[in-house]
Structure formats: structure tokens, C-alpha cells
Amino acid sequence: MSHKELLEKIDNAKIVSFDIFDTVILRKIQKPVQIFDIISNHMSMGTNFETKDFSTKRQLAEQTARDNAWIENQRTEISIEEIYKEFRVLTDLDDGKCNELLTLEISLESLFCAANPYMKKIYDYCLENGKEVVFSSDMYLSYEVIRTILYDNGYTNFRKLYLSSKLNKTKSTGEMYNHIVSDLSVQPKDILHIGDNHQSDIVQASNKGLETYYYKKCLDYEKKNTRSDVDQGVLANIIKGIMNNKIYSDRSDIREDFWYSFGFQSVGILYVSFIQWLSKQLKKDEIESVYFLSRDGYVMKKVYDALHNNTENTVPSNYLYASRRAFNFASITGIDEETINFLCSGTSRLKVKEFLKRINIDYTAVNEVIKKVGFPDAEHIVDSGKDYAMLRDLYSELANLISSNALKEKELLIKYLDQESFFDHKKVAIVDIGWHGSMQYSLEKMLADVKDKPVIHGYYFGTYEQADKYINNGLNIQGFLCNLSKPYEHYSIIKLCVEIFEFIFGAPHGSVVKFEQHSGKIKPILDDNDMNDGKMKKLNSMHEGALEFVLEIAPLLNGLNINIDTELAVQPLKRILENPTKEEAKKLGDIEHAEGFGNIYVKRYIAKPSSKLLIFKPKQLIREYRNSFWRKGYLKRFFRKI
């Protein structure tokens, strides 16, 4: 039955009855019974009772309580208190311990509950159209607990709540429907009941004359679309449950945005694992304040703040405007080999005037020097080895001007750091995506002669082995996914397409070109060349999806003190990079990656074959494939074309 038909049924009903669990309320776990495993993992019994037996004994206690209720007075429902009374007999635990377990189970049930976003919209539609709403459930939890769960998840306006644990009548036998019809003083046909259990919510309700709508539970869709039912542990099942709810809950036939889904399903989990690792390092190293460097740190800070919302003893977070160009150029004290290598860096073919513009030099003022070193003019494209030799000579000739500009930028940058309270601490952390560690090196080099500067610890998503030379010089540098290119299997995932990793850690603003002072305040001057409206929309949508995943899982991680393992976190993105679907290859391959620094950029697609006719031009095909940032994505797209 379609979404449109559901709305039509609502329009024709006087009262709408909603089932609760797996309908208006979803649990953030693949199978609710796995909550018993979590209790086992987080509860010390303090007796000879084996913790690992909790799930088995708890389920046996429930079945025993149901059998006894039926034998003694033909009741078809029980309460959680009756379950734990039987559990006490089965385990010989004292009343205090059993009550503690009962309270823990209720708190975990509440913790794992979340509003079904699709059904919440349906519920709101009912209210907006003047329909009375009731809730009904076969559930052993108390009326007060269920009402609180509904209220906490936004279901605050309803006429009645019918629970089998209070009424001693169930939907599974049909008796509850008789009670609801009588209690509401309406004809059965005036009630539309919506639920996920075909027998108790559809067959029994229909037998009693109610209109029905079958909302197939998310887990049933998941079973249909996956081959394996292997138990991968509690955390994996929590993540699977959250993913299932997101993927299968909506029945409106509106296709979710690719970038939002990509963020929710593949990126958010990686953000969380990285920030959990970072938080441990900050605590271990006794960091006083953490600075997330723009632009990579933009979403990192959002995730950090979300995970640490309302938590005690959190290291304060800051967003620090920074860039490779701003830090490296400000650290220049003279024109040596290292400096010239930096000034000549980049893989893009640029004009002489563009190389000069990157370091804030007006080419028209140095035209004579440009010609002196051998260039015909400032429009000449630097391409050959001879061109780069002349470019190095040009920088040497302009050494005094470059050093003067660098000193001015250094003074402003130090003032900016002071403005951001960077020097108010003894130990600070800087965080960004990483790779070689050159930004931290330049920062520390620039601050070498500053008194009372803090000890700086650099924490990065990943570092390559080239960062080892900075560590040997005394820098504190650590990587998350790979540290100095180890372990190799993680390093190799990054190398499948570095540019996609850089995209997912992008920010909706340009890179820092330099700093300027206005009205006594130091402000960054940002470039806007490398982020067009289309790319910005993709990035924002991806961030939105990823951050929703973070907000979904954060209460569980914090409440249960669970950390997401690196291997588990990287799997979704690894699968995409190694074996993308056609849609993934096209969407990600169409991202334009910008190379350069300062305000000079050259853009290239990550993986976009130029033509299917390349099959007849093998040399051009091979060259284009080798120049592609993401070769596996390129191949997937190319062979789709032909």
C-alpha cells in the first residue's frame, strides 16, 4: 500500500491508532533482544551467576512468567516486574540486584528508542487534519515508561494510550481492539490502525472491523536485501540498526539525496571514530585547549562538540583559520632551498604571474626581473625543467621582497593567534587532516622566537612517513587512520583517492590567503575560487547526513562508553573506493578537485572519462586513466560508457 493510499485512509478516518514499537518508535539496534547482551557487558553480578548467561536467563524468565500468567488466570500479558520475579528464582540473585537490573533494562530501552521520522510526519499530518490519535501496544513495560518514551520522542498530543501490561488485554488476541472501540464509543470502521505486525496489527484489527495499514518493519526489509545474518557484535548491530532505520523507514517514495545518504551511511562513522581517538589523546597528553585548523577542521569541530555535548571535563574546542599557504609563507626567514621548493610546489601548470600572485607580488612591478631570469613575459606557462629552473632564479632575485612580505604576514599571524588565546595555555593541540606535517612544522618554525609559547601537539586523521623527519626534530605528531604510513592497509585506503578524503573534510568557505587588520581585529582573507555552488551544495548535504548519524549514535556511545573501532569505521568508505557502484563512481567522480595554494587554483575532475571513444585511442585512454585521481572510479565509469 502506497504513501498516498495511507494519507487517503487517514483522511477517511475519525481516529487513528498507532502501534508503538517498530512503527512510531524505532530502536537503534538491529534486534531488540541484543539489549540483553549490552546489559551483560555493562553489569557485574557480584555473585556466582555468569554475566554471559544474562540474556538466556532473562528470556527464559519472560517465557516462564507468561506461562504462569496463563496457567493461573488465563492472562496473555505480563509486567516487567513479573519477569524479574521469575529471574530472581532462576538466578538466586537478591532483590536489590534484580531491581538494579530491572532499572538498567528500562533505562536502556529508553536510551535506544527514537522517533520514526516518517511516522512522525504521519502523526503530525493526523493532528494537522483534526484527527484524534491513540497509541496501542502489546508490551510488558509500564504505562509511565511508555508514555515517557512517547513524550521524549515528540509524541505529546494523543487522546489515549492503550497498553497490554495495564489492560491485561492484547492486540494479538483481538481483545484490546474490543476495549478500544468500547472505550472511545465509536464504530470500528471509524478507526484506522497502523502497525508492523501482520497478525496482531492487521489480521486481528481487521477481524474486529477496524481499517488497517500495514507498515512493514525495517528489519524485514533489511533481511530481504542482505544475504548474511551473522552476528557481528553489539556495536556492529547498533550501527546496523541505525542504518536500517534510516534506509528503510521512509515509505513516501521520495528518493533521498545521494550526498546526504553518503554522509549518513559512509562518512559519519569515520568522523566519530576519529574524534573518539582524538579525545583519548587529548586526555592522555593533558591538553588544555584544542584548535581545529581550517578548513579540514570545520566538520571535525562540529563532530567533537556534538560528541562532547553536556559532558564534563571536555577540552575546550576552537576553530582556527589556517592554511598551508598562510603558515608556510609566514615562516619564511630567507630564501633557501627549502623555501624555494615550497614556492615552486604544486602540480598545476601556472603562468609566471600566477606563481607571483600566490605570494602577494604584483608582477607588473617586477617585469624587468622576470625578463632578466629568461622568461619572455609574465604570461609564460611554467612547464618544462628549464622553466622551473628560471622560476627558482626569479625567487632568488626577489628574495628581499619575499622576505619582507613574509615578515609582515608573520606579525599579523602571531597577533591573530594571540587574539584567539593560543598563547594562554601551556599545552595546546592542533587538528586537521594531516599527511606530511608541514603546517605544524611551519607554525612551530614561525613561533621559534616567541616567548611563552605553548607546547604544540598535532593530531591528524593520517600522517605519511615523510612526517617522520619533523618528529625527529622534536615535533609532537600523531596520526589516526595511519601513522607515518602505518599500518599499510589503512595507508593504502587513503591512497586509493586522497582527494575524496580531502573532500569529506572540506568546509563551506574558501582557504585562508592571508590575514589583515581591521578596526583593531585580525581577520582572515579567504579565497573563494575552489568551491562553486554545486560543490558547496554537495558538501553541505554530505555534512548534514554525517552529522545526523553522529547525533543518532552519540547518546549510545556516551551512555554505554563504547568506542567505534577503526576497522569498523573505515569499511563503508573502503568498499566505495575499492568497488564503487555506478552511481557512486559518477557522483564522486564528478567532484572537481582544486590544486594550488593562495588564490591560484586549477581544477580537475576526480574521475571523469572524457569520451567513450577513447576505446579507439588506447594511448590517450591510458594517459587519462593514469592522470585520474581515483582510478577505480574512472574504470567503473568508463566501462559503463561503452
Image: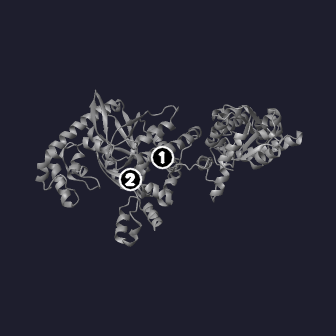
For the residue marked with disc 1, what is the amino acid?
A: Met
| Image quadrant where residue 322 sits | top left
Where does the image place residue 69, in percent across and percent down from the top left? 85, 40
User: Does residue 559 appear to the left or right of 205 in the view shown?
Assistant: left
Q: Residue at x 44, y 42 (%)?
A: 299
Determine whether the residue tagged by mark 2 lies in a helix, strand or loop.
strand
Which circle's residue, 1 or 2, is located before the other in the chain?
A: 1
Residue to which mark 2 is pinned: 592
Where does the image place residue 21, in percent across and percent down from the top left? 70, 42
Instruction: Reply above or below: 226 against 72.
Output: below
Q: Is residue 19 visible?
A: no
User: Does residue 266 appear to the left or right of 363 in the view shown?
Assistant: right
Using the image as rendered, state which of residue 284 and residue 188 is in the foreground.
Answer: 188
Rendered image: mark on residue 542: 1
Q: Is residue 614 visible?
A: yes
Mark 1 touches mark 2? (CB < 8 Å): no
| Image quadrant where residue 48 sits | top right
Circle 2: is it few (<14), some (14-19), or many (20+) Cα within 10 Å?
Answer: many
Using the image as rendered, state which of residue 252 and residue 429 is in the foreground.
Answer: 252
Where does the image place residue 203, in percent across and percent down from the top left? 79, 48
For the residue marked with disc 2, what is the amino acid?
A: Glu
User: Does residue 544 appear to the left or right of 464 in the view shown?
Assistant: right
Instruction: Reply above or below: 362 against 454.
Output: below
Distance, label 1 to label 2, CA atoms, is 16 Å
